[in-house]
Image (cartoon, grey):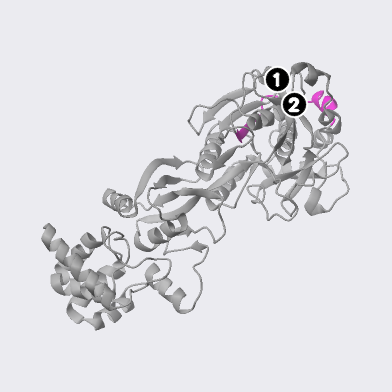
């Protein structure tokens, strides 16, 4: 089609759009313009286009103007509008199942806001971050395409909405193939997801790329090897580790640690890591958070890890400088999928953040495969809403207590708290052969993962449900409500002895 003809059609559609209110127009979907061609054209606009090209060519003309494939509803409207005028529009509604456009129109008429989880037809699923939610990458999306999606449709999506595809990966645990896209323009993540849900039926799902943080509060002082050797580890006595290690030290149980970069050359971690997977990809030095978690589970020199003979699968999903450590849904999904492919028995998740449907589904599949999932409940305080993945079903949420079995004040509360473990002023390994004192539910979760490894080493056929029951049944009751301290403080020796009965 020549440039002059196309310009004429655009002018006709634009003038027609000015004459009548847009069909399905809302505050969430901008009116049709030449710049944003992903917006539905008005009924009168489609009538004019249909009259010009009639039944054979009106859908093609509409595709050219919108820069995308038409929905069935739009195609029928253009064809029937050509012959029947306004009657054709009514007939199209009767013949064609409602699309997202009609759903949005209904929401406007009833003054109801769009749902948080926007289902847009059979097999389509979009999760729009609610107002006030900011814990996501501000310029990224995670999309899933239907099998019928064409290269042309993906190109139209990219060009029309100013998106760049960054990576695509198939996840074996869930069977999904997901793509991560960058928003190059100024449109927000929620607005972009709404536009895709409304105008691109070839996209079967869309989500924000949520952000998760390591939940730990390191002390400013970093101790030397000599200081570490002379310092006591109250965790050893609290969990009865010396007695437990006479029975088992977690021999060769595979524990995946999804965290920041671990110092695998630390004297306390020599030979501990069986395999590594760097999800982030960018160069980085060893980080204090991941190194501390690995040491809490498996230290075997100056310090005594809970399960010093386990093998760690180190998934670097978190990045950051100093004490910060952040990751995203997409990177954590890749890490969990990798850990499952390596036959991990336990996945330690010493991080917390917002709920996410994709991560929840992945963890459910991992749990069904027999993988024990352990996570920190978070350090956001008693008034914080539940944090995830600790609050997901099948995940063992762990809180932190001190040497006197008192709950760490900053720890989250709620029904997601299954157990408590030492997590206040813990002597831990640090990068560059050093040591640190750290506090938080992160290291408490790592201690619980170590105890779970001891249990599986002595009784490898236990299911995740049985592991959870054993850990909670053998816990030592301490003062505090169930939603504060769970079943009590974990006890390695009691757990192992209970499994031998």
Left or right, 75 with respect to 169, comes to: left
Q: Is residue 354 left or right of residue 180?
A: right
Q: In which quarter of the image is residue 104?
A: bottom left
Question: Is 479 left, or right, of 293 in this rendering?
Answer: right
CB-based contact (under 8 Å), mark 2 and mark 1? yes
Image coordinates for residue 212, horizontal then vertical, percent: 59, 44
For residue 280, above or below residue 73 = above
- Per the model, the C-alpha gap separating discs 2 and 1 is 9 Å
- Sequence order check, earlier mark of 2 and 1: 1
Q: Is residue 279 magenta?
A: no
Helix, strand or loop for disc 1? helix
Q: What element carries label 2?
A: loop
Give the magenta-colored segment's residue range: 240-259
* Up/down of 415 relative to 240, above or below: below
- Which residue is under mark 2? 305
Q: Which mark is residue 268?
A: 1
Image-based side of 61 in relation to 312, left or right: left
Q: How crowded is mark 2: few (under 14 residues within 10 Å), some or many (20 or more)?
A: many
- Could you tell me residue 322's position as x and y percent? 62, 32
Judged by depth in the image, the label closer to the viewer, 2 or 1, is 1
Q: Residues within 10 Å of mark 1 (few under 14, many from 20)?
A: many
Residue 201's place in the image compared with 377, above or below, is below
User: What residue do we see at 60% from left, 34% from top?
Assistant: 259
Picture quadrant of residue 218? top right
For the question of whether residue 453 can be seen, the reply is yes
Residue name at image x 50 percent, y 43 percent = 330
| 71 or 112: nearer the viewer | 112
Which residue is at the front of the view, 299 or 66?
66
């Amino acid at each position: 089609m020549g440039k002059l003809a196309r310009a004429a059609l655009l002018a006709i559609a634009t003038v027609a759009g000015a004459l009548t209110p847009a069909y399905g127009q809302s505050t969430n979907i901008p009116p049709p313009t030449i710049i944003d061609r992903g917006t539905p054209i008005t009924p009168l606009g489609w009538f004019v286009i249909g009259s010009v090209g009639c039944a054979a060519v009106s859908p093609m003309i509409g595709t050219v103007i919108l820069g995308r494939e038409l929905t069935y509803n739009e195609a029928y409207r253009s064809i029937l509008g050509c012959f029947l005028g306004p009657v054709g529009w009514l007939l199209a509604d009767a013949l064609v199942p409602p699309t997202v456009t009609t759903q949005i129109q209904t929401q406007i008429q009833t003054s109801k806001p769009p749902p948080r989880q926007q289902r847009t037809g059979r097999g389509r699923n979009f999760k729009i971050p609610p107002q006030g939610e900011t814990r996501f990458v501000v310029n990224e999306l995670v999309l899933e395409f239907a099998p019928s999606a064409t290269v042309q449709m993906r190109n139209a999506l990219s060009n029309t909405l100013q998106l760049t595809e960054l990576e695509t990966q198939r996840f074996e645990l869930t069977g999904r193939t997901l793509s991560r896209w960058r928003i190059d323009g100024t449109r927000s993540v929620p607005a972009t997801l709404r536009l895709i849900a409304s105008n691109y039926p070839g996209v079967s799902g869309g989500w924000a790329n949520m952000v998760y943080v390591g939940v730990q509060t390191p002390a400013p002082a970093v101790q030397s090897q000599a200081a570490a050797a002379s310092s006591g580890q109250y965790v050893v006595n609290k969990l009865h580790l010396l007695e437990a290690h006479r029975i088992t030290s977690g021999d060769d149980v595979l524990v995946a640690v999804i965290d920041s970069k671990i110092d695998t050359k630390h004297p306390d971690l020599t030979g501990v890591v069986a395999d590594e997977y760097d999800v982030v990809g960018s160069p980085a030095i060893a980080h204090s958070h991941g190194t501390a978690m690995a040491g809490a589970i498996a230290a075997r020199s100056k310090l005594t890890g809970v399960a010093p003979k386990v093998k760690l699968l180190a998934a670097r999903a978190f990045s950051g400088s100093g004490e910060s450590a952040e990751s995203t849904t997409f990177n954590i999904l890749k890490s969990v999928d990798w850990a499952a492919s390596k036959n991990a028995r336990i996945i330690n998740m010493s991080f917390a953040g917002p709920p996410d449907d994709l991560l929840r589904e992945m963890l459910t599949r991992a749990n069904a495969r027999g993988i024990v999932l352990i996570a920190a409940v978070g350090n956001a305080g008693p008034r914080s809403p539940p944090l995830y993945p600790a609050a997901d079903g099948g995940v063992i949420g762990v809180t932190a207590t001190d040497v006197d079995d008192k709950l760490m004040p900053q720890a989250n509360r709620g029904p997601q708290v299954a157990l408590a473990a030492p997590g206040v002023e813990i002597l831990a390994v640090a990068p560059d052969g050093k040591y640190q004192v750290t506090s938080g539910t992160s290291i408490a979760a790592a201690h619980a993962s170590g105890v779970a490894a001891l249990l599986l080493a002595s009784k490898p056929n236990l299911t995740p449900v049985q592991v959870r029951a054993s850990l909670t049944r053998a816990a030592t009751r301490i003062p505090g409500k169930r939603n504060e301290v769970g079943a009590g403080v974990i006890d390695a020796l009691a757990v192992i002895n209970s499994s031998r009965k």
